[in-house]
Image (cartoon, grey):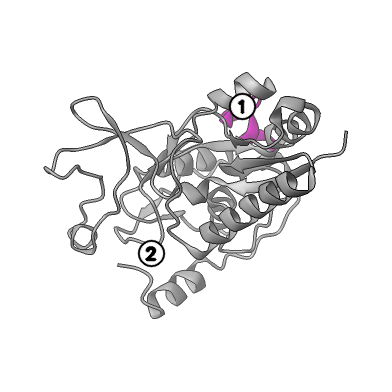
Amino acid sequence: MEKLVVASSMSLYGEGLYRTPQGSLLPGPERTLAQLKARDWELHDANGAALTPVPTPETKAPTLASIYALSKYDQEQMCLMMGRAYQIPAVALRFFNVYGTRQALSNPYTGVMAIFASRLMNHNAPRIFEDGLQRRDFVSVRDVARACRMALEAPSATGQVFNIGSGRHYTIKELAHHIARVMDRSDLAPEISGQYRVGDVRHCFADIGLARQALGYEPQVTLEEGLVELMSWLESQVAVDRVDEAVAELSARGLTV
């Protein structure tokens, strides 16, 4: 059966889902400018109590925090609407932070893993915004490809939206240390900038329960295995480190706090 599979993104969630001290769930509220200037990075409820991040399911309403997020949500919804209107089987996959061989290494706006690798390949320390404790879900491109095939082959997937991640989460600081260790560059400790980049969210990682149930999706590549494969490929690559240039441009445009 022919089917349209659209590559959507976790970015459309904005902040992920959170639990209050009382145990109820709520979407992560937007951090205020005053809070960010005070370097108070974590999210709080209306009474100032700390919120705990939890896996984000597909039922969380989108919070479009960037032009990229808006564009991915538009693409997703257009494909699903067209599918319903013209009886074209269509399914949307919301990819979380995808990494793997053959990804762009010299683009400072690509995934954080490639950016860190590019820095380390050029004997520069990874640069991290905020305090490095923001959490993300990193999924191997091999698992993403497997999920695409499953979405194509599963009749029950038509018309639905699925998170595709690893089902695990790490801080950005942890990721930087993992990459440095695999690349034998542990001497290059990450630089914590203490700055906020406009459009960034604090925590967002995947609840993949629906993909498990409907597609039979089960991640097979651990972060450790995926990093070893990625770094083996990097040995034959050349990367141009443009991070300093990108950070300067962000600052010049008023996009860092």
Res 183 → quadrant: top right
- In which quadrant will I find the C terminus? bottom left
Q: Which residues are magenta?
A: 218-229
Q: Looking at the picture, which amino acid does disc 2 mark?
A: Val
- In which quadrant will I find the N terminus? top right
Give the percent coordinates (x, y) of residue 81: 67, 50
Q: Which residue is mark 2?
A: 198
Q: Residues within 10 Å of mark 1 (few under 14, many from 20)?
A: many
**Residue 163 is inside the magenta segment:** no
Question: Furthest residue to the right?
Answer: 1
Res 52 → quadrant: top left
Give the percent coordinates (x, y) of residue 253: 41, 79
Q: Nearer the viewer, mark 1 or mark 2?
A: 1
Decide which of tag 1 and tag 2 comes sooner along the chain: 2
Indicate the secondary structure of the residue bearing disc 2: loop
Closer to us: 94 or 38: 94
Q: Which residue is mark 1?
A: 211
Give the percent coordinates (x, y) of residue 135: 40, 40
Question: Furthest residue to the bottom?
Answer: 252
CA gap, disc 1 to disc 2? 31 Å
**Residue pictured at 76% horizontal, 50% vertical:** 236
